[in-house]
Image (cartoon, rainbow, N blue to C red):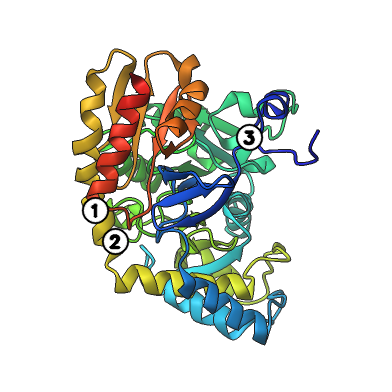
Amino acid sequence: MGSLWHGFADMGAVEKDGAFVVARGEGAYIWDEQGTRYLDATAGLWFTNVGHGRREIADAVSKQLGEIAHYSNFGDLASPVLRELAERLSGIAPVPGSKIFFTSGGSDGIDTAAKLARRYWHEQGKPEKNIIVGRQKAYHGMHVAGTALAGIPVNREGCGELMTDARTVAWDDAASLSALIAELGADRIAAFFAEPIIGAGGVYLPPQGYLTEVRRICRENDILFVADEVVTGFGRIGGSWFASSRFDLEPDIMTTAKGLTSGYLPMGAVFIAPRVAEPFFAGGVWFRHGYTYGGHAASAAAAMANLDIIERENLLDASKNLESLLHEHFSPLAEHPRVAEVRSGLGAVTAVQLADPAEALAMVKTLRQHGVSTRAAGQGALQISPTFVITEAQVADMAAGFAAALG
């Protein structure tokens, strides 16, 4: 019996069947420890935007480790690379002049946003605005705030009551948000959290006009709009750095992580619009919050090299091109009797929804036999979110692997 406890796993099944051990990666491929090659359909866990095995990022990290690996950025402390990264991120932010608060990852970012939203209203003399609102199917990480806020009840099973002031509305109906505001009163709601594309909850694309409408509702009711771009940030949405830019959302707070470093090291960044940051930058007000490894210097070096690659290789355009390629190659699978639908057509994201959700975990293993590594998401969806450097021929091979696995 092994000692490793896997996340989100039936450990009895893992002990019985064994782990799928990924030994190395290059570009759009990974290899197991027996040397078998697979197309990586998920870019790790939504994050390897620039592909596996980028020596340039490893070299940047090595250089930074040789100078100073990390130092706290609490109080007045900072490292040169972290200051440089903050300015670079502010320069591409959906809201000009945004401040950047660094975390260790996406779950940290959600906790940061939840606390900051409430603290902001406290500084505005409205401490009663403390309810945070999420959506059904949504995933916002696994810290207490994110687990309570998210719309995946099974993730809360057996954990007791996590937060009494979190609410959930329909994922696809802006009117349900308006109804909750009418019920509770806008003067009690601090923030509304929304993933532009629902990720781990099943890979659901936003209905036409939905994001624009919920943003309008939040603005008109003076509720902070928090865009959770941990999955969609840094090009996954296609054509723009962020979904918030593509949909002109102007978020008050935006959480990011995964694609910031392409997963080469853990790091997250919370973008805070000037309106929200102002009380804390005016002087005399502390936001008593931070993480030991938030803004890790070596992670910042990885992020800088990752952003260089995205810009130099025009990977935002490559991601936009994947929008049509994935739709072209995967949409025919919707005709298969074992498939309920294929969700595609927005960024480098697609899902094959199985007609029988109970088949999903077995199908993941069957796909490995056909040279594809993917994962199950939500209720029976198979995730497709490849690296932006994948070629059209590799997309076609991946789709062929799905077709063969479906039989």
Residue 159's quadrant in the figure? Answer: top right
What residue sits right under mark 1 in the picture? 320
Tags 1 and 2 in contact by the CB under 8 Å rule? yes
Q: Answer above or below: position of 85 versus 386.
A: below
387 vs 326, left or right, is right
The quadrant of the rendering that contains the N terminus is top right
Q: Estimate the spatial distance between the alpha carbons at disc 1 and disc 2, rounded to whole Å.
A: 6 Å
Q: Which residue is mark 3?
A: 148
Amino acid on which the number 3 mark rests in the picture:
Ala
Q: Secondary structure at mark 3?
A: helix
Q: Secondary structure at mark 2?
A: helix
Q: Is residue 285 left or right of residue 207?
A: right
**Mark on residue 316?**
2
Q: Quadrant of residue 264?
A: bottom right
Give residue 165's position: percent from left, percent from top.
64, 35
Q: Of the residues under marks 3 and 2, which one precedes in the sequence? A: 3
**Residue 77 image position (x, y, % from top left):** 69, 82
Q: Is residue 226 visible?
A: no
Q: Is residue 95 above or below residue 348?
A: below
